[in-house]
Amino acid sequence: MYTFKPRKGLNILIGQRIRDHRKQKGLTQSELAQNIVSRSYLNQIEKGNVFPSFDIVKKIADKLGCNIDALWQKDANIDNLIIADSKKQLSKLELSSEEDTLLRIEDINSINLSLLNQTELGIFHWIKGKYYFLTEDMPKAIEHFDKSILLLKDSRNKVSLVRTLHDLGYLYYILEDFTAAFQKLNEAFKEIQEYNIAGTIRYLVLLNLGIVHGRLGENYSAIRLLMDVLEVSKRTGIKYQYGRLLTALAICHRSCKQYDLAEKFYNNAKNYYQLENDESKIAEINHNLGSLFFYKKEFSKSIQHFKKAISYFETTVPISIHIFKSLVYLAEIYHEIKEPDKGILLCEYAYSLDPPTSEKIKVLKISGKLYSDKGDITSAENSFIQAIQLAKSDSSIQSILTTDLYTELGILYYKQVIQN
């Protein structure tokens, strides 16, 4: 009934059968694939490049009007071929790049889960979690990462367990749930310590755990962890997210008021990003150096770095949050050095860009202070009142900011009384 080429595997066997039945029915690949899989995926099945799931083959058989056994016919050792093919496909997906993972959702969904052992199921759910993370469906990503961790808990494959714990911790970091991020990354760290796991996964766990420590305000422990990462990098040559590591060290040292060390790491990060030709990151480092010199009251250097950052953001990403922060800082400097006219112009420009509410409030706050410097009490009062109204209209704005605005308004009224 069928004329088969020499079989190189089960993929080719099933692919040929599907193709032969399709041609007998006079259907194109697009017509057969419709409402089942994409045409390109059906083409890959027919070529024997991928192994379809039982469910996909069942749908194809129904559409072709044949019994599934005609496509999925058992022969000698076919069970072993199915199992081997599923495991091989899982292995390929596990090693896929982020781009490949996004493109291969049909491959992911075609794996027959009943053929996988517990560890392999754990890896499968990690792959699904990775896919949903990349497509920004965070609830589904969390669901699959949690399943993966549960399945891998008792597995000897501790590297896979650590990998999933790390990726779930990093997901919570992206969501700014730093407590949950710390819990998962700390679990990963304990596994690394107990089983002496090395390599890139150790590097990444320590890096993100250190950064999360910093975000939780534990800057000294963050520095210890991040310095361990730096040592791993020097010893192994791993440079993954190296600029992020240097920037995190700079931020933690700045938070500890160790300004000279912060400046050193910022400059190291800047040099690294220059080698990478990453202008966006260079602009962010210029912003951070500007804020550092602001805290050090080295206003001339601060102005230079903020202007460099603003110049980049204006030409590349004018609606970036960074441009508003840089403009506010720069206006604050002009308040400090008593050049209110320059600061007011910056505030007017920043407000014209229609920043988020939180940034508008900051712009109006510094505007009020600058108008006060000029002695323009009416304009200063209007700025502070407008800022207070905006803060009250947004429930996400912290009450401490509203209190601070009332304080500024009180200082303004006090100045007015003194002057009168």
Image (cartoon, helix red, strand yellow):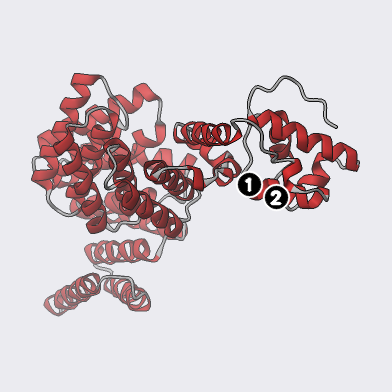
Indicate the quadrant containing the N terminus: top left, top right, bottom left or bottom right.
top right
| Residue 54: mark | 1
Indicate the quadrant containing the C terminus: top left, top right, bottom left or bottom right.
bottom left
Dot 2 crowding, Cα within 10 Å, few <14, some 14–19, many 20+: some
Dot 1 crowding, Cα within 10 Å, few <14, some 14–19, many 20+: some
Q: Are marks 2 and 1 in contact (CB under 8 Å)?
A: yes
Q: Quadrant of residue 259?
A: top left
Q: Residue at x 45, y 31 (%)?
A: 95
Q: Is residue 339 left or right of residue 348?
A: left
Q: Is residue 67 left or right of residue 195?
A: right
Q: Quadrant of residue 254?
A: top left
Type of amino acid under label 1: Phe
- Front in this rendered view, residue 162 or 325: 162
Q: Quadrant of residue 189?
A: top left
Q: CA distance from mark 2 to mark 1?
A: 6 Å
Question: Is residue 328 visible in this depiction of the protein?
Answer: yes
Where's residue 325, x and y in %?
32, 52
Type of amino acid under label 2: Lys
Where's residue 356, x and y in %?
41, 62
Secondary structure under tag 2 reads helix
| Residue positioned most to the front | 76
Question: Is residue 174 visible in this depiction of the protein?
Answer: no
Q: Residue at x 22, y 58 (%)?
A: 179
Secondary structure under tag 1 reads helix
Q: Residue at x 23, y 47 (%)?
A: 185
The total of numbered circles placed on residues is 2
- Front in this rendered view, residue 135 or 392: 135
Q: Is residue 157 left or right of residue 316?
A: left
- Front in this rendered view, residue 317 or 93: 93
Residue assigned mark 2: 58
Q: Residue at x 28, y 66 (%)?
A: 365
- Front in this rendered view, residue 101 or 229: 101
